[in-house]
């Protein structure tokens, strides 16, 4: 007799499975599910290399301004949409036991349509606050924030279960909106392997991976870092993984004419760790701007899970009200700095260089924050949502 079918859930995201950020978070969890079949549906192209992942079609938000603005306004206003109706039918035709939606961009109005037109159980993941964390920092969408918040709240309040990216996010939504949620971090395999580290006596090297939310803070840091390196008689070096939108010429000016930038546009995580672990420190930031307050207080950079595997200390450049500052301080992962002036940053850089945490400390924190319990919590929440924790699904 063949084994009973596992419950099937459709994961729906507004982003491609093969990129960093939120996709990297999910890719570190899904392969370790034991009692749940997941089909990943996403907006965008090209085809994904991730198993059982399929494109729903082009993104409904973004693109040329004059086309995007009326389309986005209609989506967030809840007006009938032939595109959403088409995607809804595609979802229903797949005969799943439940849906799992990342509450971001076009997935929010699609999720609300799903709740209105079907009885499929729904689990929702929140990786960034849609109204304040995304629209609130956007030059294009800030005026749509009230409509986004209304649609976003409607989706979350209709969900059976919710997971969020950080403890501060869970507290914020519980206090402000009376929403109960489970905190889920990525899962890092419990394998200790000392990264290869380059202790070149002639250079001082800092690394960064992925998106940078604001160049102003990074440029100020690089200027202070370059000055510190030259005072020590060393060449300032920057290992940059990804960061496609950054202005390399401005980075070079900030680092100094003697500085060297090692630019790696596309690397898998293993290769990224190999390069980043040659650095004396790694850079993470959240914007200082007032309109980024909710974003920095609730989100958590995915890059921290990569940095922990490098066993290198973190320079957290952020206001002290952020989730990043709290995590780095509470777990002694490096230093925090909430200033843009060189006189304030230089002592922090010196402190990080003089007494970095030992490599095994990062392994302890990795196991504590990014252990297998994240997989079990998320899978249990979804199974509970679709009511299939035991027995064969009705398919």
Image (cartoon, rainbow, N blue to C red):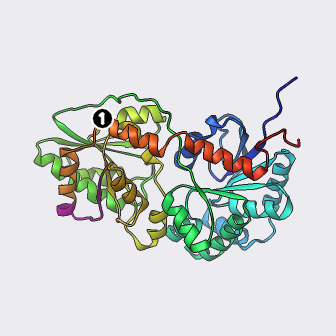
Query: As drawn, which residue projects farthest toward the front?
Result: 390
- Towards the viewer: 166 or 73: 166
For residue 218, what is the image quadrant? bottom left
As displayed, is residue 34 above or below residue 99? above
As displayed, is residue 361 above or below residue 184? above
Residue at position x 88%, y 43% from top? 394
Tell me how many marks there are. Answer: 1
Residue 296 within the magenta-colored segment of the rendering: no
- Towards the viewer: 107 or 322: 322
- Residue 122 image point, x, y percent: 75, 56
In the image, the segment drawn in magenta is 335-344
- Towards the viewer: 347 or 91: 347
For residue 368, what is the image quadrant? top left
Residue at position x 57%, y 67% from top? 173
- Residue 331 image point, x, y percent: 36, 50
Q: Which residue is mark 1?
A: 278
Residue 337 within the magenta-colored segment of the rendering: yes
For residue 160, what is the image quadrant? bottom right
Rendered-image quadrant of the N terminus = top right
As displayed, is residue 391 above or below residue 245? above
Q: Secondary structure at mark 1?
A: loop
Rendered-image quadrant of the C terminus = top right
- Crowdedness of circle 1 by 10 Å Cα count: few (<14), some, many (20+)? many
Describe residue 241's horizontal placement relative to residue 344 as left or right. Answer: right
Q: Is residue 19 visible?
A: no
Q: Is residue 349 visible?
A: yes
Describe residue 114's horizontal placement relative to residue 33 as left or right. Answer: right
- Residue 192 image point, x, y percent: 41, 29
- Residue 17 image point, x, y percent: 62, 43
């Amino acid at each position: 007799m063949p084994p009973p079918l596992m419950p099937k859930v459709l994961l729906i995201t507004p982003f491609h499975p093969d990129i960093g950020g939120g996709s990297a978070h999910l890719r570190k969890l899904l392969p370790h599910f034991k009692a749940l079949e997941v089909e990943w549906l996403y907006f965008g192209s090209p085809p994904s290399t991730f198993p059982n992942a399929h494109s729903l079609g082009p993104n409904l938000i973004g693109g040329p301004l004059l086309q995007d603005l009326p389309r986005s306004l209609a989506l967030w206003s809840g007006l009938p949409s032939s595109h959403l109706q088409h995607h809804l039918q595609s979802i229903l035709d797949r005969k799943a036991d439940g849906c799992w939606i990342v509450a971001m961009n076009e997935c929010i109005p699609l999720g609300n349509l799903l709740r209105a037109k079907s009885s499929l159980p729904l689990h929702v993941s929140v990786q960034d606050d849609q109204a304040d964390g995304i629209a609130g920092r956007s030059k294009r969408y800030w005026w749509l924030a009230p409509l986004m918040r209304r649609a976003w709240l409607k989706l979350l309040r209709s969900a059976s279960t919710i997971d969020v990216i950080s403890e501060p996010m869970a507290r914020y939504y519980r206090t402000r909106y009376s929403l109960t949620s489970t905190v889920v971090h990525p899962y890092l395999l419990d394998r200790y392997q000392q990264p290869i580290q380059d202790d070149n006596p002639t250079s001082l090297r800092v690394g960064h991976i992925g998106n940078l939310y604001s160049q102003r803070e990074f440029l100020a840091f690089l200027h202070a870092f370059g000055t510190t390196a030259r005072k020590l008689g060393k060449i300032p070096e920057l290992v940059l993984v990804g960061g496609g939108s950054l202005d390399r010429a401005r980075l070079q000016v900030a680092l100094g004419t003697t500085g060297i930038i090692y630019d790696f546009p596309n690397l898998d995580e293993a290769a990224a760790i190999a390069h980043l672990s040659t650095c004396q420190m790694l850079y993470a930031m959240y914007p200082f701007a007032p309109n980024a307050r909710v974003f920095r207080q609730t989100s958590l950079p995915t890059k921290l899970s990569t940095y922990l595997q490098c066993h290198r200390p973190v320079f957290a450049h952020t206001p002290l009200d952020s989730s990043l500052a709290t995590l780095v301080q509470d777990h002694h992962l490096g230093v925090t700095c909430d200033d843009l002036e060189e006189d304030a940053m230089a002592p922090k850089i010196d402190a990080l260089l003089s007494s970095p945490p030992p490599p095994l400390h990062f392994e302890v924190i990795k196991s504590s924050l990014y252990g297998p319990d994240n997989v079990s919590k998320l899978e249990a929440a979804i199974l509970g949502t679709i009511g299939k924790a035991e027995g064969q699904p009705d398919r």
